[in-house]
Amino acid sequence: MTRHDFARLLARARAAIVATDTADRDLCDELVQAERLVENHAVPWAAEIHAAFIDHREGGSLYGAFTREALIAEVAEFCRAWWPEIRDKRDPQALSDEQAVEIYFEGHDNEYLWSERISIDGPAIGSPSELRVGRHLVISTSHIRPATGDLLDQWAPMIPETRPLGVAEASYGWFVLTDPLYGTEREMIPGELWAAITFARTQGCRWLLLDRDADIVADLETFDW
């Protein structure tokens, strides 16, 4: 599952919650934040890493894995490859990974193993070096009524606090924000536009671009212009 797949899953969950009669507004807002976090950060949370370093005569070898078992398996491969170094008559292939590692480093006078679990923090939110990259869905303006298009033309130049919906004019259509709406604001949105917004949100998109020349979606109603 990619980051985009996960963001889309969050969006679908949010759309399902919004569609219920008892939608939890706080939960929906938290899901919005989670979607943005996943979309805008390569690693949106801290990662626990198991690391090991082998000091040997050729220099050193560094290993890393998400679990201790995977890490020990990698170190055990090194130990089995160099097993003759310790002159132990046991067959290293017959030993477990843990046993092979323990016996090898106990029996070797000049090689040492260091291992530790470390935490790598994800990039800080709001970091100046972070580029905010989002996703938008492009569909035909025929999925809304001409009268709804007139509403979008009226709302686009208004200041954000006075319009019910985030909207901006495009060359041949409109950009529409897909964030959840409640109460009076939700009631002001025409049904076919809300259906398109919900569809875009289930695709993991925070913006919907209604474009005159875009494709028609089979699952949405269409209207003559």
Image: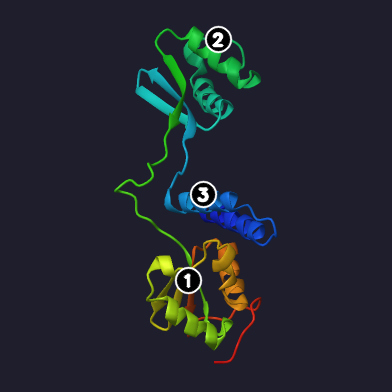
Residue assigned mark 2: 88
The residue drawn where x is 48% and y is 30% is 49
Which circle's residue, 3 or 2, is located before the other in the chain?
A: 3
> Is residue 223 or residue 98 the one in the foreground?
223
The residue drawn where x is 37% and y is 69% is 159
- Mark 2, residues whose alpha carbon is within 10 Å: few (<14), some, or many (≥20)? few
The nearer-to-camera label among 1 and 2 is 1
Could you say where residue 220 lies in the image, as x and y percent from the top left?
64, 77
Could you say where residue 211 lies in the image, as x and y percent from the top left?
47, 81
Give the quarter of the image for residue 131: bottom left
Amino acid type, mark 2: Asp
The residue drawn where x is 51% and y is 32% is 65
- Mark 3, residues whose alpha carbon is within 10 Å: few (<14), some, or many (≥20)? some
> Is residue 58 or residue 64 the one in the foreground?
64
> Is residue 72 or residue 192 the one in the foreground?
192
Q: Is residue 22 left or right of residue 46?
A: right
Could you say where residue 72 lies in the image, as x and y percent from the top left?
54, 24
For the view shown, which residue lies furthest in the right direction? 21
Q: Secondary structure at mark 1?
A: strand
The nearer-to-camera label among 3 and 2 is 3
Quote the CA–CA distance across marks 3 and 2.
54 Å
Give the quarter of the image for residue 200: bottom right
Instruction: Check if mark 1's residue and mark 2's residue have beta carbons within 8 Å.
Output: no
Amino acid type, mark 1: Val
Residue assigned mark 3: 34
Q: Secondary structure at mark 3?
A: helix
- Residue 176's label in the rendered image is 1
